[in-house]
Image: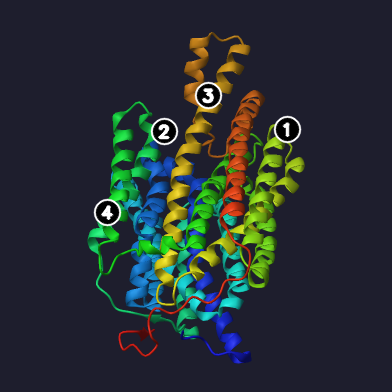
Amino acid sequence: MTSVTAGPAGAGRKNLVLTAMIFAVAMTFIDQTIVSIAAPKIQSELGLSSTGMQWAVNSYLLTMAALFAYGGRLADTMGHRRMVTIGVIVFAAASALCGLTPKGSLAETWIVVFRAVQGVGGALMYPAALAIVVNTYELRERGRALALFFGIAGGLTAVGPVLGGYLSAWTWRAIFWVNVPMALIAVVLIVLSKPVTRHRPAPMDYRGLVLIAGGVALSVFGFQQSNVWGWSNPGIGLSIGLGAVLLVLFFRYEKTVASPLMNVSIFNNRAFLVQNIVLGVAMTVFVPLFFFASEYAAVSLGQKPSQAGESLLFFFLGFVVAAQIGGRMLDRVGAKRPVVSGCAVAAVGFYLWAKQLTTLDFGKEQWMIVIAGAGMGLMMGPANTDAVNRASSLSYGEATGITQTVRNYASSLSLAILGTVMVTETRSHLVSSLIGQGMTHAEAVKAAGANSGSGDSGGSTAAIPHFVRVDFAQATQTVFYIMAGVMALAFVVALLGLRHGLQEQPEQQESDDDPAVAAA
């Protein structure tokens, strides 16, 4: 495997490569959550419909989930450094255009399209960036390196709502423009660090691309639209069902292709399969957490948009510290101990956090948030790293594409499903409270239907009655109890599915002397 040389100079170059890749992917993590906090302002100023605003948020996650496998395969066949650079440029250009969204009839289409293009840039960039980091560090060094990578990246996901709140106080357009200087720094660092990886040119499996992109897009679309159309709409079941069929066809088709988009035989590796199941389960909690915690802070705690994400800084504190511990544990004793322990700690943390939500006292929640963050930080990096380590050096991009497809697919579905739970629970509690206030059942149902959809108050939370705050907190509590249960499930899967011990370097499937293998 081509690698950066050892020693002080080699160590310095490795750190520069790691810094470059962190700057490259930082934009993708921030943008997973930063738009949600500014959504009311964007919708109001541009005159977007509720559906249009929903798709301005979701089109980004959807295109990333649908194209991660493609991005990973491109990185392995065209060169990791080339693809991460292209991805950064595409992402930055799309961000600038999102910030330039014109007012008027074109606004909705414009922002949805360029949010989707941001997702394309992220799908091209992220697998290549992670593959570069994995290629740069030796097997026994990767735990610590990727702990820093995932720790900072996860922390930036938590920072997104806070940054979004402050930037949108100036102008919501700044939440997109902030990506441009970050992209410039990333490109400069890539040029300076000159990361060296290997790739093998190969034909692209476009039939497989159509199948997986269509399957992911349709199934996620069905779940996302369930809140808008309602589960009784036949289009929801049709979309989800057709998406599932396409994904099954994709899996079967890939077994027959000489140069597949995704080498599905890698799932025969027990550790890779288990880690992807654990990651998929955990991501049903990780991304939705930021949305629901920010909404709870705004509605139930009455915080302003600039403050609504600050509770997540406590999550970030636990996450980053525990991520470093998890990375060192991975290098020292293998993946099972940090992954199993992290899932258990996260389950306890979310359970304790949920119990405190209805007190409406943030002071009582702080340490519970730190515990939940620590659990997620302890398990997430080792699970990701252990999964990617199972691939050969010429397939790191593909392996990353698979794990990221699983992660984003799971989080997109979960955001839609938990969103439905949240709306249903809020409406139910509001109906009971309004009947207690003297309304008839019919009046209460009508009033609850008009007000249960949200905390999209744009900052005017001071006028929210106390009983509404409590009802919203009770609905959030239900969602967080579900999250605790989900992490308990991840604990069981990791405990039963993973094996103790350090992983050995996988055998290389291609010779270093193979002329088809190129360095880039």
Question: Which callout, 4 or 2, points at the residue further toward the start of the chain?
Answer: 4
Cα–Cα gap, marks 4 and 1: 48 Å
Q: In this rendering, is residue 91 above or below 55?
A: below
Q: Where is residue 495 drawn, in percent x and y?
A: 62, 53
Cα–Cα gap, marks 1 and 3: 20 Å
Residue 80 falls in image quadrant: bottom left
Question: Which callout, 1 or 3, points at the residue further toward the start of the chain?
Answer: 1
Q: Give the secondary structure at mark 1.
A: helix
Colouring used for the render: rainbow
Residue, disc 4: 211
Asked whether disc 1 touches disc 3, contact meaning CB atoms under 8 Å apart, the reply is no
Q: Where is residue 100 drawn, in percent x and y?
A: 37, 57
76 with respect to 372 (left or right)? left
Residue, disc 1: 359
Q: Where is residue 19 drawn, in percent x and y?
A: 55, 75
Cα–Cα gap, marks 3 and 4: 38 Å
Check disc 4 and give the amino acid type.
Leu
> Around disc 2, counting alpha carbons within 10 Å, would you say few (fewer than 14), some (14 to 19), or many (20 or more)?
some
Query: Relative to the observer, which residue lies in front, 194 or 464?
Result: 194
Question: Which callout, 2 or 1, points at the residue further toward the start of the chain?
Answer: 2
468 with respect to 69 (left or right)? right
Q: In this rendering, is residue 416 above or below 72?
A: above
Residue 427, numbered label: 3
Q: Which residue occupies 32% across, 50% down?
A: 247
Check disc 2 and give the amino acid type.
Asn
Residue, disc 2: 227
Asked whether disc 3 touches disc 4, contact meaning CB atoms under 8 Å apart, the reply is no
Q: Which residue occupies 34% across, 39% down?
A: 240
